[in-house]
Amino acid sequence: MKPFHIFNTLSRRVEEFQPLNPPVVTYYSCGPTVYLPQHLGNMRAYVFVDTLRRTLELNGYDVRHVMNITDVGHMTSDADAGEDKVEKTARAEGKTPREVADFYIAQFKRDCDQLNIRLPAPPLLCRATDHVADMIALIERIVERGYGYVTPSGVYFEVEKWRGQSRVGRLSRQSLDEQHAGQRLEHSPDKKSPHDFALWVLNQPHHLMQWESPWGRGYPGWHIECSAMSMRYLGETIDIHSGGLDHIPVHHENEIAQSEGATGKPFVRYFVHNAFLVGMEGAKISKSVGRFPVLGDLAAAGINPLAFRLFCFGAKYRSELAFSLDAVRAAERNLDYFAEFARNLADAEAEARADSPWTQEFDQRFIEALNNDLNTPQALAAALELVGEAYRRGDKRIWNTLKKLDAVLGLGLDAMRKVTHGEFPAEVTALQRARDAARAARDFKRADELRKELEAKGYEVKDHRGGSTIMPRRRVA
Ligand SMILES: [Zn+2]
């Protein structure tokens, strides 16, 4: 079998993946800034993160995955200008920054859960505000090594000293002048150059979140959190780091500079970047412009949120994907196709028997597609054709194979099958039926009450057209 290959932004090539210490893979993915609901463009990125992790696991790797939660320091402009995003929402809503962050973290976890995105368990799902001491220690190392300097307005990273003569970024392959061409760089007169970025911000008395540091009371810049938390949990050199394409020129260049400036060692071996979800007009779906669709909008349109996961599989992660409700509805038909097959499998037919030999071809095609730089459209086609072939041959001995593919597809087909075969207590299925009836009668208040009862008994509910699926609640961080 072809080993796993992935496009490395550092080399601009698809490379064979070889971790530093197999079978362990250290993986850091940039996570959400928690000041608004995550829109579907953000959720596409997290489906990608989850697919990458699951594919590595399918290849037998033991993935140590860290994701950060930004709850301080991310300014309304990625280049340090403007207002702290979390504090801006806190002021607007009359809440504390902690309350704002807690609220949107809970919502993010619920949305991930609806999409079967497995988040790292704490402490590997880590909040910036819980790691300020790590950031201060790292900034001290940077200053000691001569790449950071202290001023009355903050501690800054000296970008030109780090980049040297050519001034070209390793990841973006742009010079500083190209990178900032046509931009008016607002900057503090304390900075040696407008390209320098803040590691620690001082003397901003209006800022709500402040910590003591060797340089005075202040708060961390946005970029330093990822370096500090990555090193804390994964070591100074990690295998994979992922984020959106928009992270390349500023956030990830800065992460490399400050990490390697502190340690003198390579920070990341494979940098992986996902493309955007675009609206019908081709515009980037971004938090800074207006209101973009969120997962709840799909449920409101009668679409099973899990269909969005299959919709994401329809394009390669490095390609833009055009969003429309109709396109997600089309993906929902594939979801129904898989779900119907799983539900109609009689128990005895399923696990007990070995799969038919002809299934191997589909299994191979699925893994080869994923190992070829995560070609999810081809992998999805192989999975759909596996089910189609079962119908065509009248031979349903494919369950073990389908379950294996679902380890990456992440549709929870096993749970769907168990629901159909009454493997839950009678009182639980009775509650589910009552709730389905309430929803059919548009009595959403009653349906909500029944959902809470099911949740109290340890079951989660997912709605879709014509019914619902229940499954034992996974422990979510
Ligand atoms: Zn980051």
Image (cartoon, rainbow, N blue to C red):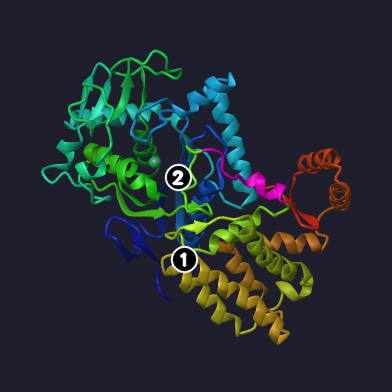
Regarding residue 477, the answer to whether it shows in the image is no
Q: Amino acid at mark 1?
A: Asn
Q: Sequence order check: which comes first, mark 2 or mark 1?
A: 1
Asked if 88 appears above or below 454 in the picture, the reply is above
Label of residue 85 in the image = none
The residue sitting at 24% across, 31% down in the picture is 141
Q: SS for tag 2?
A: strand
Identify the residue under disc 1.
59
Q: Estimate the x, y position of residue 381 in percent, counting from the top left.
A: 56, 73
Residue 246 lies in the magenta stretch? no
- Which quarter of the rendered picture does the C terminus lie within? top right
Is the CB atom of the residue marked by disc 1 within 8 angstroms of ligand 1's nearest atom?
A: no
Dividing the image into 4 quarters, which one contains the N terminus?
A: bottom left
Let me know if residue 296 is in the magenta part.
Answer: yes
| Residue tagged 2 | 66
Residue 320 picture location, percent across and down: 46, 58
